[in-house]
Amino acid sequence: MEEETSSTVRVLDGSQIHAALPSIAEKAQEKFKEIDTENKGFVSPADVKSAAVSEAAALLLGTQVSAQVFDSAIKGVPLPEGGTLNEEDFVTSLVQCLRAIADALQDEPIVVSVLDGSTIKTLLDDEDEFAMLAENLFTALDSDDSGKLNRSELRPAVLQLGLEQGVPPPSAKPEADELITKILQKYANGSDELGQVQFAELLQAVLQDLADSLSSQPIIIVSDLRVLNGSKIRKMLDNEKALAEVADNLFVGLDVDNDGKLSKNEIRPLFETQGSKWGLPSPEESEAVSELYNDLFKEIDTDKSGQVDKSEFQVLTKALFEGFAEQLRLEPIFVNVDAAYR
């Protein structure tokens, strides 16, 4: 399901699409009629894909899934190559495509920042915090220590706030650039100089205007965060054959002297270095992740001198995977995309 990690960050994990599937057939029929403008009674597979992209985006706060995720998701959907689909087939195929996309997003959720002005309003409501922020910005921009700033320097001041304060980066989306430019044209034009008090008052007016605009028309920006929620591990746990193969391969890779035994102190480093394959976070990611590893490996770390054979190793790794899957389900971890794949 959709999880909210702060006032502006949301996770699109496919639950939004799954929830809409029961009512999608009627919309699909209307979509077919929109596409079949010449009333031929059939459309192409490309039309199905295009409809799936647009319908998925409509259900995901206007966010499009990447081409990579889309292509991978619909590989199993039987679409006639070079053929056509009548209305019934179109509806069936569209529903199948959307279900496949939703399933794919369970493994690869999209993290978005919903900039609706609420973060800016929270900042403005805290007079002390805003005063300190304005003072710090003024000091940073007043490079010659003149105690004055040109009105035009409002733009870099606003942009320095960034996503953390709910300000959309102009480079993120055309509508973000248009909004920032429009508001700053009202306040930042001119060459008159501002003292610290004047600067703070003007900055407050800019941010209030920006918050009001975002409140009426939020801007959605895809984040560079990845969610590790245990989905991949749960799928592996549901497939006993795949789980056994993983455990066997790991055991063989570690049993370099072929004596059929492994030392327990080899298991934790294995999970720490290869965990990204199964959707596990690195313990270096944060203190919380390090504590998660400490909790799950507590018993093993206490008895590092022990040894395990292959069957014991399988039982142990399964228990560890189950522990990670449950903890990540309860408390998903957000990591930078590059960190998740290192």
Image: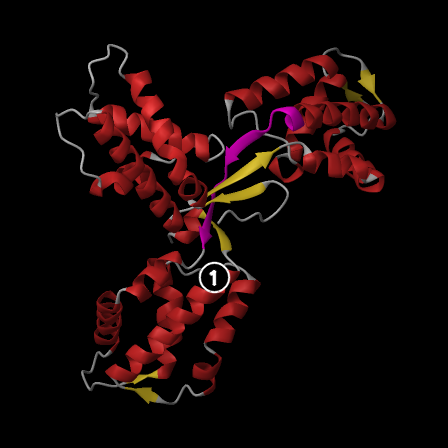
Q: Quadrant of residue 30?
A: top left
Q: Residue at x 29, y 22 (%)?
A: 32
Looking at the picture, tell me which residue is in the foreground, 30 or 153.
30
Asked whether residue 284 is in view, the answer is no
Look at the image and tell me in which quarter the C terminus lies.
Answer: bottom left
Count neighbours of disc 1 (C-alpha within 10 A) and say few if under 14, some if 14 to 19, many if 20 or more.
Answer: many
Position of residue 62 measured from the top left corner of the image (x, y, whole percent)? 47, 30
Count of all numbered marks drawn on residues in the image: 1
Task: Give the left or right position of residue 310, taking residue 196 as reference.
Answer: left
Instruction: Examine the rendered structure and indicate whether residue 338 appears above or below residue 125.
Output: below
Position of residue 322 measured from the top left corner of the image (x, y, whole percent)? 40, 70
Identify which amino acid the numbered label 1 is placed on.
Answer: Leu
Q: Is residue 225 magenta?
A: yes
Residue furthest toward the left? 82
Instruction: Examine the rendered structure and indicate whether residue 221 appears above or below residue 37.
Output: below
* Residue corresponding to mark 1: 328
Task: Give the left or right position of residue 143, taking residue 54 as reference.
Answer: right
Q: Residue at x 26, y 35 (%)?
A: 92
Q: Residue at x 21, y 78 (%)?
A: 256
Q: Is residue 319 magenta?
A: no
Asked whether residue 248 is in view, the answer is yes
What colouring does the structure picture have?
Answer: secondary structure
Position of residue 335 measured from the top left corner of the image (x, y, whole percent)? 48, 52
In the rendered structure, which segment of residues is drawn in magenta?
A: 214-228
Looking at the picture, tell me which residue is in the foreground, 179 or 133.
179
Helix, strand or loop under label 1: helix
Q: Residue at x 18, y 26 (%)?
A: 85
